[in-house]
Image (cartoon, grey):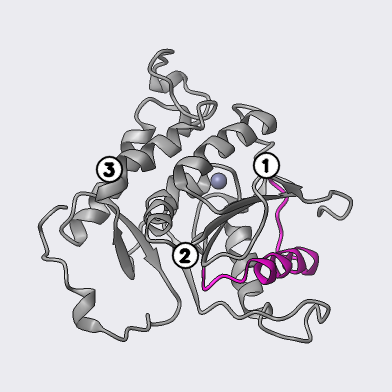
Amino acid sequence: MTSKNTPPVSSPTPLQACDLVVFTAHPDDAELCCGGLLILSAEQGWRTAVVDLTRGELGTLGTPELRAQESEAASRILGLSARRNLGLPDGRLFDTDENRRLIVRTIRELRPRLVIAPPSEDHHPDHLATSELVRRSFYLCGIGKYLPELEPWRPRGLLTYTGSQPVIPQLVVDISAVIDRRMQAVRCYRSQFHQPANPRPAESSPVRIAAPYFLDTIEGRLAYFGSLIGVSYGEAYSGELPLPVTDLVRLFEKEPWKNP
Ligand SMILES: [Zn+2]
């Protein structure tokens, strides 16, 4: 089942050309997995965007309307130039030609230099489907005869963020300077996570992400990835191809094992 009769649902933020675009399955995925990179990139002057494929309407907690409000608040903290929700059906995401066309259209509208997709291994079927869809569409969006009514666009790079599975990352971004804001963006999704004012023991949490320890595990993962490059917090990314480097010395300009 696809969204043939369901028009895309846009957030109030209009879609426009961007430098970096993160695709996710659900509202809050980008904050949980890429928030530091998005905040840093916006501060560095890049135009950043997040495209959520579904509204997360199958979520045990919250409602799509509430999650949309939370997403808007989080987007402001991330400093996004654009955020769009494609309104595809939660729990029924598949790598179909119709869905590929939707992703290709979105990439051609946004014209990003860098695309970031979910990892190709994950416990959630929607995350897997989004990864497959974006990775296939990444190739197709540069082919002029595929959807010829739209000008083709070839992003220069495709990376995947880190999900629930263990990985040896290809690169780690130092997000130590923005860790507080990153976690503040995550906590905008009040309907999804544990609230200290409303204590609930871990064993009675309806879902894993609402357990009291869940956000600590997120920070723990960021601290682990940071430790791999000698900083307090890091986000890990990987790609299918070697990374192009033109100035290898500059890549190592920061002294290791020293925090900002
Ligand atoms: Zn998700």
Residue 73, above or below 178: above
Q: Residue at x 83, y 78 (%)?
A: 149
The picture places residue 233, in percent across and down from the top left corner, at: 25, 50
Q: Are marks 3 and 2 in contact (CB under 8 Å)?
A: no
Q: Residue at x 44, y 38 (%)?
A: 185
Return the disc, 1 or 2, that comes first in the chain's sequence. Answer: 1
Horizontal relation, residue 120 to residue 227: left or right: right
Ligand 1 within 8 Å of disc 3? The answer is: no
Residue 33, above or below 155: above
The picture places residue 71, in percent across and down from the top left corner, at: 57, 38
Callout 2 secondary element: strand
Q: Which residue, as the protein is rendered here, is positioned at the far front?
A: 45
Cα separation between marks 1 and 2: 21 Å
User: In the drawing, what numbered circle is on residue 160?
Assistant: 2
Reading the image, the residue beneath label 3 is: 220
Q: Answer whether residue 114 is visible to the viewer in this image.
A: yes
The picture places residue 225, in percent across and down from the top left corner, at: 26, 55
- Given the image, on which type of amino acid does mark 2 rest? Thr
Q: Is residue 159 in the magenta section?
A: no
Callout 1 secondary element: loop
Horizontal relation, residue 238 to residue 66: left or right: left
